[in-house]
Amino acid sequence: MPTPNSPERKRAPRLPKQAPPRVAPDEGDLDDVRVAAHDCKACPLWANATQTVFGEGPEQARIMFVGEQPGDQEDRQGHPFVGPAGQLLDRALRAAGIERGSVYLTNAVKHFKWEPRGKRRLHKKPGEAEIGACHQWLERELELVAPELVVALGATAARALLGRATPIEANRGRLMPLHGGMQVLITVHPSYLLRMPDTAREEAWRRFVQDLRIAAPFAADSRRA
Ligand code: URA
């Protein structure tokens, strides 16, 4: 099986057609990369965000979860998945038998994209250019954590990881190869469940937990030697 540095490790898909400014350092550990990401201005999103929200979790995690972008709470607090979607993810992880502290959590885009609506900041979906500009950080996280399994939460994460638009419903709930000997599991984003009508939420929750149970065996022995 290819290791992170073996010659068989395939190249990551290249996302942006036009290369964004390269700011992710090629060397250093996760903390060095986190510090460099703090000042990232590779796309315009930094200007309206409070801060860069970088990934968190053990560097030896066997599973990495990738969401879309920080939300309002994550932007204020500086940590991924601490708002309503994160709390729902926590409950789903528990139901699937996965300890949150054993996994690495990050996002495809590391700044909050939003538009004002009265006093509120409404989430805006990141575009191709922003996903492309931020890809360098995600790639560095993948290289340094080198998880065995990456869970893509929703379409933006799947797009960033696979380098192409990948329909969620047709691809969810099965292990697929990713570059570098990693595997990817696609499922829905937890905020999709938050937006559902009550009548459909129970079934959507059941399917979400069922998808996450596929990841659970990877978490069983979360720390590698
Ligand atoms: N949604 C995401 O995709 N990521 C977060 O960190 C929070 C909400």
Image (cartoon, rainbow, N blue to C red):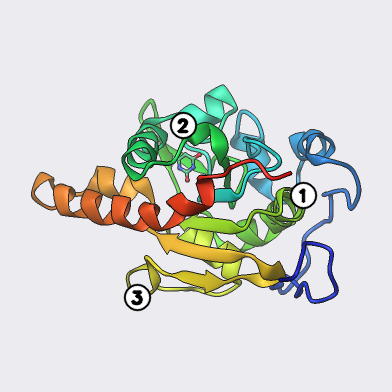
Considering the image in quadrants, where does the C terminus appear?
top right
Per the rendering, the mark at residue 170 is: 3
- Select label 1 or label 3 by which is in front: 1
Q: Which residue is found at the position 78% from the left and 62% from the top?
A: 4
In terms of depth relative to the viewer, which is nearer, 91 or 164?
91
Per the rendering, the mark at residue 94 is: none
Q: In this view, does 13 lie above or below 68?
A: below
Q: Where is residue 133 in the image (x, y as percent from the top left)?
A: 70, 57
Q: Which residue is found at the position 54% from the left and 66% from the top?
A: 159
Q: What is the crowding at mark 2: few (fewer than 14 residues within 10 Å), some, or many (at least 20)?
A: many
In terms of depth relative to the viewer, which is nearer, 221 or 15?
221
Per the rendering, the mark at residue 144 is: 1
Q: What is the crowding at mark 1: few (fewer than 14 residues within 10 Å), some, or many (at least 20)?
A: some
Q: Which residue is found at the position 37% from the left and 53% from the top?
A: 213
As helix, strand or loop, the secondary structure at mark 1 comes to helix
Residue type indicated by callout 3: Ala
Residue type indicated by callout 2: Asp
Tell me if 5 is positioned left or right of 133 in this view.
right
Disc 2 CB within 8 Å of nearest ligand 1 atom: no
> Which residue has dot 2 on it?
72
Cα gap from disc 1 to disc 3, whole angstroms: 30 Å
Q: What is the crowding at mark 3: few (fewer than 14 residues within 10 Å), some, or many (at least 20)?
A: few
